[in-house]
Amino acid sequence: MSLTSKFNLRRLSALLLSSATLLALVTGVTSANATTTLIHNVKGYTINDGKLTEFSAIEFTDDKIDNVYATKPSGINSSVKLIDGQGNTLLPGLIDAHGHVLNYGLSLMQVDLVNSKSEQEAVARVKAYRDKNPEQRWIQGRGWNQVQWPVDQFPTAASLDKLFPNTPVFLGRIDGHAGWANSKAMALAGITKETKAPVGGEIIKDSQGKPTGIFIDYAMNLITDKIPPLSKAEQKRVLVKAMKALAEVGLTSVHDAGVTAEHIELYQELAQDKQMPIRVNAMLYLPSPDWQQKLDDGQYASDDHFFQFNSVKIQSDGALGSRGAALHEDYSDQPGTKGILLHKDKDLANYIKTAMAKGYQVNTHAIGDHANTLTFDHYAKLIEQSGSQKMRHRIEHAQVLRLDDIPKFAKLNVIASIQATHATSDKNMAQGRIGKERLKGAYAWRSLLNAGARIANGSDFPVEPTNPFYGLHASITRQDRNNQPLGGWISEEALTTEETLKSFTIDAAYAGHQEPMLGSLEAGKQADFILIKEDLFSQEPSTIWQNKVLATWVAGKPVFTK
């Protein structure tokens, strides 16, 4: 849901990563001369040919799976490397179908404001961060959410100005659709009472017309334009740092939802230099610098399948929490407000049409019911014009839907790219925003499946935590990590454990046109898998989010061990 603005692409030039070195491969598990490995004594699960398959051993040679076995095979060749899984559970590598890798890497080097309980606590966290990082010329952070505070109202520059009168501060909201600036940042950006917001954005002003410090959607660019950009080398380090951290939570592949042409080139270089710990499927953000030329350059896949580019990301509206999601009718808690469409209708249609005509998969961010209907209207016309139904176009988030729009996913072969933890994060806010009636089509995963849709699951990190077991838990229980509410929120829309695993594996791979090589454990596919502590299919559902990753393997090599 994060807006791909310059805020997402920049940070202090003084911020440097300590190392760009990749995680060393675990010794004693593989060697240059050992090409075939058998991991046995595991509780293995994979979705093969649409059915849950159980196994106790898996054999692979180099990066390819040779076979999975119901029982450990006999007569094993002495040259085969044997690894005892010690009864732990083995799953296909989990795939996050919607995340933001660079933003996540940057978030590891910014103030963490997630779950701050008040405006004052958020400011205190900024001060604590500043005390530890006095060299930074700008202070950036992310994660505040005024809905969780005692008073549901936006913060102001004034509270930051007391502690940071001379240091520019810019802090992103949890959903990436609003930013909170202090007066120094606004002064550097030349923001005054006369400053007008760009199309697709809003500057919140007080009763005297003075900017309060809150910038919505594209208005954030007025501030972020002034933040020094990362160098090419720094950006590579950020990407590697992020990918290493993602491997630690069991992710072997991520769909990077909205990158620039520059970042596609960075990924290409990392892949060519064999510096990618996990796989990335990148979506080019439209519009972004040189996007038309990048489309003309054509699609790309690295020889080792670690990096792929064959899709675009277009953003039609904002987010529900900041009332930027575009609704057909007014927000229930703010009459007169229907949200924001980020593009003129003709421009949105042009972006979709251009990408489809050039053979790209189109992935459109749509959260509000108006944005979803509008996206479907364009898809219905332009998919037929371009003959691109087989491209598996997607709607990212598909969060608030009119009931009569739900069947359109299957009809048009459009994938619903959902993020399960959005539901458990939004549950205390959503009904207030849209009312009980519209909630019937919101976060409606069971309804989508029942209507024949295919679901790809993800997290939208860093908006939500990267840990995919949080998403597995939310999908199955419809509860937050305090296991609230009892019985689950709108529990009739929950998924089964098998359906949820499918959405994080083979269906997420399908959503990236990668199911021939990823997403399940079977002969001929890539040896991407994870070893976890608890048996996903027998553990108490309320504890799924606490499951621990013991090891992550990508292309037959361990990239993380606990």
Image (cartoon, grey):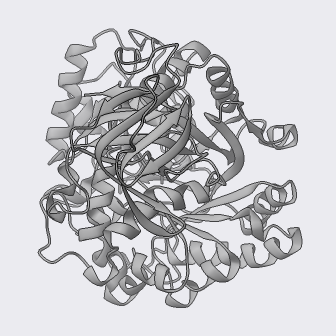
Q: Residue at x 68, y 26 (%)?
A: 268
Q: Is residue 538 above or below residue 285?
A: below
14 with respect to 312 (left or right): left
Q: Looking at the picture, how far across and down is residue 263, in whole percent?
A: 64, 30
Quarter-of-image position of residue 261: top right
Q: Nearer the viewer, residue 548 or 212?
A: 548
Residue 384 in picture, x, y percent from top left = 84, 76
Question: In the picture, residue 138 is in which quadrant?
Answer: top left
Residue 64 placement (x, y as % from top left):
57, 37
Task: Kindly identify the residue that appears in the image at 46 percent across and 69 percent down.
Answer: 51
- Picture layout, residue 510 above or below residue 451: above
Q: Which residue is more in the foreground, 376 or 194?
A: 376
Report whether residue 253 is seen: yes
Q: Residue furthest front?
A: 75
Q: Which quadrant of the figure contains the C terminus?
A: top left
Q: Please give left or right for residue 380 compared with residue 336 in the image.
A: right
Of residues 340 and 534, the one nearer the viewer is 534
Residue found 31% across the figure and 39% down from its top: 157
Instruction: Give left or right: position of 360 versus 118.
Output: right
- Answer yes or no: is residue 169 visible: no
User: Which of these two is toward me, 65 or 153?
Assistant: 65
